[in-house]
Image (spheres, rainbow, N blue to C red):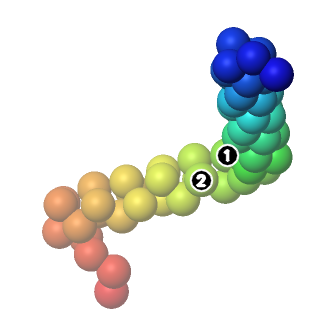
């Protein structure tokens, strides 16, 4: 085998490995994407936290 062939094969293997890694990272992102209920709960928690801060700022803290 000539050195050029070895370089080409090595380059091809590196490209294939990079594509596999990119696809795997994309799949992990898709799997971990929060569903609608999770986002809704996060929004509700954020709204509740904001309301509590506003009550505290007005001096109506929890009694």
The residue shown at (78%, 41%) is 24
Check disc 1 and report its element: helix, strand or loop.
Answer: helix
Q: Residue placed farthest to the bottom in the image?
A: 63
Q: Is residue 17 above or below residue 57?
A: above
Q: Is residue 12 visible?
A: no
Q: Is residue 15 above or below residue 44?
A: above
The residue shown at (82%, 22%) is 1
Left or right of residue 55: residue 46: right
Circle 1 packing at 10 Å, graded few (<14), some (14-19), many (20+), is: few
Left or right of residue 47: residue 7: right
The quadrant holding residue 54 is bottom left
Name the spot of residue 13 as percent of width and height, x first. 77, 29
Give yes or no for contact between labels 1 and 2 (Cβ–Cβ under 8 Å): yes
User: How much space separates mark 1 and mark 2, taking CA atoms?
Assistant: 5 Å
Name the spot of residue 26 as percent of width and height, x first. 74, 34
Residues 16 and 25: in front is: 16
Q: Which residue is mark 1?
A: 39
Name the spot of residue 44 as percent of width and height, x first. 59, 53
Q: Is residue 10 above or below residue 24?
A: above
Q: What number is the disc on residue 31?
A: none
Q: Which residue is mark 2?
A: 42
Q: Quadrant of the C terminus?
A: bottom left
The quadrant holding residue 58 is bottom left
């Amino acid at each position: 085998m000539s050195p050029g062939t070895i370089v080409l094969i090595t380059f091809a293997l590196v490209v294939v490995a990079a594509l596999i890694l990119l696809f795997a990272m994309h799949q992990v992102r898709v799997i971990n994407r929060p569903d609608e209920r999770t986002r809704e709960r996060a929004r509700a928690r954020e709204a509740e936290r904001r309301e509590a801060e506003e009550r505290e700022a007005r001096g109506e803290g929890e009694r």
